[in-house]
Image (spheres, helix red, strand yellow):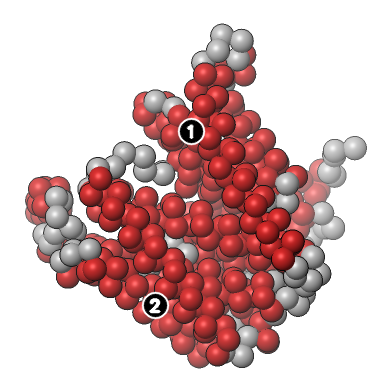
């Protein structure tokens, strides 16, 4: 019943192994060039997918990735697991401890990053000819929502990786940026849930449909966090909790899968469940436990599931046939200027200095993993077509590049990220200079 033929298993393992190896190799090369690893991982799919291998050697591409009837479904399953693990990992990076001043800054930046960017994205959708980018759902309203989200979305995983690589994860700046990205993206996932609900209704929008979608998303988030916070800690450490005693990691993965399944049952995106499971662990578990779980999830996810997810995104792209370079460059300029200026102006309004405001604007203008998740969900639900899917993925990749380069310059120059981070930046600059002198 659950068996594949031996030749099919061998074929799939060969194709998956090649894709995984390419993802790690190109990710490694990207990091050596000070480019976020995710760009290299998606590039693996571009190299082995329709863009390069499929274009020059179409028979080899079809043999490798479409060699038997169920192969695409096996890759699809790994793709979904990678997506869930990415969102679970993102939730585990959620920040929980703030001073009143930091809460004020974060709140202003969340509003500043969301409202103007969403409005500009919505207006741009009205001004641009977006009809050629409609997906099979043929829902113009859902497409407009996706465009607005794509302008405003921010990435926790990529910016966290950049902070870790630069040794500035413990700075006040990093804490505020990650918190802003987390809260910001929860709001945008609610909007995405509304868009996917519209698409699933065959293009019919009613007030009842809209209110139901928003109520389900908000209710699921609030109910999970409130009930989870009250019950999770107590239930976890009960002597009768044999699953936790049998395997701590297995227990938390079980919670993640159950919340994702519940979200799907309620017609809320399954990624909500995985994200909230991570946030719940971060909020309710002692710091030592949440850090151990985060490390365990990283050990499971980043060697296999997450690289395969990003590489499979690349496999779905055909930049030769489905990519309008001029449209993309205009869209990139619009998204980058809108998000960066919105954050810069918001930061200046609360009396942050110019350099701090620039740093915040560039760091938050980083779409990375969530931008790719947005594009894949919108594409899979028929909101966008393959042409716009390629635009959104490339937007996520390019805007992930900017913050890493800029923040590396800031650290190397010994400039301040924001008030309160002077000592950390000074120590990091000395460390970098020491490494350079040894080399």
User: Which quarter shows the N terminus?
Assistant: top right
Q: Position of residue 431 (x, y in %)?
A: 13, 48
Task: Tell me which residue sits at (58%, 86%) in the image.
Answer: 126
User: Is 225 placed above or below 351 here?
Assistant: above
Classify mark 2: helix, strand or loop.
helix
Give the number of the disc on residue 281.
Answer: 1
Residue 223: quarter of image: top right
Q: How many marks?
A: 2
User: Which quarter shows the C terminus?
Assistant: bottom left
Residue 38 makes an appearance in the image = no
Classify mark 1: helix, strand or loop.
helix
Counting other residues with Cα less than 10 Å from the Cα at mark 2, is it few (<14), some (14-19), or many (20 or more)?
many
Q: Position of residue 364 (x, y in %)?
A: 36, 63
- Of callouts 1 and 2, which one flags the residue occurring earlier in the amino acid sequence? 1
Q: Is residue 159 left or right of residue 321?
A: left
Q: Which residue is more in the foreground, 325 or 156?
A: 156
Q: Position of residue 73 (x, y in %)?
A: 77, 54
Mark 1 to mark 2 CA distance (whole Å): 34 Å
Task: Tell me which residue sits at (59%, 26%) in the image.
Answer: 251
Q: Which residue is more in the foreground, 14 or 399?
A: 399
Q: Is residue 88 left or right of residue 381?
A: left
Task: Tell me which residue sits at (26%, 49%) in the image.
Answer: 102
Q: Position of residue 306 (x, y in %)?
A: 54, 50
Residue placed under numbered mark 2 in the picture: 338
User: Is 201 placed above or below 261 here?
Assistant: below
User: Is 73 placed above or below 335 here?
Assistant: above
**Mark 1 touches mark 2? (CB < 8 Å):** no
Residue 244 makes an appearance in the image = yes
Q: Is residue 422 left or right of residue 265?
A: left
């Amino acid at each position: 019943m659950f068996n594949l033929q031996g030749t099919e298993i061998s074929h799939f393992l060969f194709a998956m192994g090649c894709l995984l190896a390419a993802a790690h190799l190109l990710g490694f090369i990207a990091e050596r060039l000070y480019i976020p690893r995710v760009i290299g991982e998606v590039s693996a799919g571009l190299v082995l997918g329709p863009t390069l291998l499929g274009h020059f050697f179409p028979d080899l591409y079809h043999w490798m990735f479409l060699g038997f009837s169920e192969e695409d479904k096996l890759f699809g399953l790994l793709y979904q697991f990678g997506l869930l693990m990415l969102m679970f990992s993102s939730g585990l990076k959620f920040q929980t401890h703030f001073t009143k001043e930091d809460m004020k800054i974060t709140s202003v930046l969340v509003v500043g990053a969301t409202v103007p960017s969403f409005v500009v994205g919505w207006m741009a959708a009205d001004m641009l000819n977006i009809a050629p980018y409609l997906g099979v759902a043929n829902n113009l309203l859902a497409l407009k929502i996706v465009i607005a989200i794509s302008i405003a979305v921010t990435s926790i995983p990529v910016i966290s990786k950049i902070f870790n690589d630069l040794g500035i994860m413990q700075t006040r700046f990093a804490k505020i940026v990650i918190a802003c990205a987390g809260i910001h993206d929860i709001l945008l996932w609610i909007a995405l849930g509304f868009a996917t609900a519209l698409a699933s209704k065959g293009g019919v929008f009613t007030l009842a449909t809209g209110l139901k979608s928003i109520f389900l998303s908000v209710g699921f988030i609030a109910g999970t966090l409130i009930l989870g916070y009250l019950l999770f800690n107590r239930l976890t450490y009960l002597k009768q909790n044999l699953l936790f005693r049998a395997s701590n990691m297995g227990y938390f993965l079980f919670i993640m899968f159950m919340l994702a399944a519940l979200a799907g049952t309620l017609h809320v995106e399954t990624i909500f469940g995985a994200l909230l499971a991570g946030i719940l662990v971060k909020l309710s578990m002692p710091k030592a436990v949440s850090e151990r779980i985060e490390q365990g999830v990283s050990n499971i996810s980043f060697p296999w599931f997450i690289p395969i997810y990003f590489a499979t995104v690349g496999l779905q792209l055909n930049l030769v046939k489905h990519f309008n370079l001029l449209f993309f460059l205009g869209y990139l300029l619009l998204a980058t200027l809108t998000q960066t200026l919105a954050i810069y102006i918001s930061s200046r309004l609360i009396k942050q200095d110019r350099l701090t405001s620039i740093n915040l604007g560039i760091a938050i203008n980083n779409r990375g993993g969530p931008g790719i998740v947005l594009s894949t969900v919108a594409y899979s639900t028929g909101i966008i077509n393959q042409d716009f899917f390629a635009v959104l993925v490339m937007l996520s990749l390019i805007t992930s590049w900017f913050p890493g380069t800029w923040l590396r310059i800031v650290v190397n120059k010994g400039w301040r990220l924001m008030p309160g981070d002077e000592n950390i930046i000074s120590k990091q600059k000395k460390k970098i200079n020491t490494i350079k002198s040894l080399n």
